[in-house]
Image (cartoon, rainbow, N blue to C red):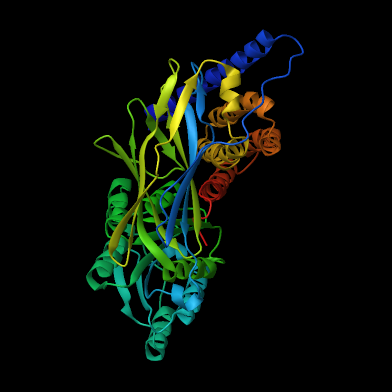
Amino acid sequence: MEANERNLGLEGKRWIVVAALLAATALAAAAARGKGSPPAPVGDGSRRFVASPAKPVSFSATLDRTAVLVGAAPEVRMELVIGGQAEESRAAARVPTDLFVILDRSGSMSGEKIERARGAIRELVSRLGPEDRFALVTYSNDASLDIAPAPADDRARDAWLARVAAIAADGGTNLSGGMDLALDTIERTRSPGRVPRAILISDGLANQGDATPEGLLRRAGRAARGEYALTTVGVGADFNEYLMAALADAGTGNYYYLRGSDDLSKVFADEFEAARATVASALEVKIAPSTGVQVVEAAGYPLERKGGEVVFRPGSLFAGQERRIWVTFAVPNQSAGDHPLGDITLAYRRAGELSTLRFAETPCVASVQKADDFYAQVDVAAWTRSVVVDDYNKMQQDVAREVKAGRRDAALEEVRRFRAENAPLNDRLQSADVQKKLDSLGKLEADVVSVFDGDEQAARQNELSKAQTATSLDQRRVGAKR
């Protein structure tokens, strides 16, 4: 971990130098044109790539630029847009759903938390249709299947509500035991034509069973391999937000942070509605980069690198949903030339059948010598989205992580990196939305400093980390939630 943190710090400094080089190159080009000469226009559009229509899923992409400057930053960002066609009627969109709640009943959940959790489950049960099935696994020192999966008829509901009312909070947190029991049950009882979805709730740190991040992530990966979703909900101040977010990513679900359990009913409702309106599951974006091209990041999703290919799994798609995911590439820029990014495909399953969408042409980026040529190939609108949506929120996630670790100076360095990379470009591109983000950095720096001053410093660092991590993750992954 410490080596990674040192590398991140060196990487940030390297990009500050690169940004300065880009700014210097642009100024030199302006000087060469002569004092008072207007700069060459910036680009007003870039290449859009579309896969052949394949109802009910659409797949397209837009580059924020089609050129990089030789010797400067090698990164380009591509916005992938994955859409689910809206069904003609609400009834047509409904898919029979198996909803599994995996509830922490450890001692720290006692009192208001467990009471609100019971209330949220009661409300969820009232939403289920006769074609839906519900199951409840609870865990503390051990795990138990309190409600076995069964259709939601009136007789079952009465029995479920009585069982929910009897749940008591006590003991430790055997998170692995709860996951094992729930995932085993899903895989043992699932049937074709139904959409399973698991919602894991915890308010603390795993301290029983297999509490290792590696073991817990391996368990969450069962959902991805089984082509269903595991969503995670962290409640309160004592859970590990990075682990809970990583479990959701490994399980191709969503991550939620709740300061209390007040909004648990809404989380259940949103996840249930998304599940029963599913039009495609097991989304898998696969990139086979061309020689010299690297896939750097994809909105924070885990990247699997196998045999020269890069894969990430955004989860499932519901009717009417439009997911937007920024993928960052690094292209060779030591000398001028054209660089195809590579083959990019989207695979998904619908009614058990596998489909694959592929762009009709291969996206290509040029390395150019002159700043004017670079700026002419920037799509200002797409670049603005890439900065405001992806880069800014990634920076906020990095700041939150440094704050949580007690590294004030490293957190401030992340803010300076964002400013150094984007301010010189915006001097030329003149994006009002990017300028607003740049103008807000002073307040962010002041907020970081204030967290480290005064009493209850650790508590304030923890709160900032949890709130900012969850908010920034949602804002990076536009359209991921209902």
From this viewpoint, is residue 405 visible? Answer: no
Q: In this view, does 226 lie to the left or right of 321?
A: left
**Closest to the observer: 160 or 308?**
308
At 62% from the left and 26% from the top, the residue drawn is 425
Percent coordinates x, y for residue 42 in the rendering: 64, 28
In the rendered image, the quadrant that contains the N terminus is top left
Q: Foreground residue, 185 or 280?
A: 280
Residue sitting at 42 percent across and 79 percent down?
A: 164
The mark tally for this picture is: 0
Q: Which residue is at the front of the view, 83 or 267?
A: 83
Residue 475 shows up from this direction: yes
Of residues 477 and 159, the one nearer the viewer is: 477
**169 vs 78: above or below:** below
* Picture coordinates of residue 51, whole percent (x, y): 41, 49
Q: Give the image location of residue 339, x and y in percent.
A: 40, 26
Q: Position of residue 128 (x, y in %)?
A: 44, 79
Q: In this view, does 41 lie above or below 472?
A: above
x 49%, y 35%: residue: 77
In the image, farthest residue toward the right: 36
Task: Identify whether 93 is placed above or below 81.
Answer: below
Image check: 209 left or right of 47? left
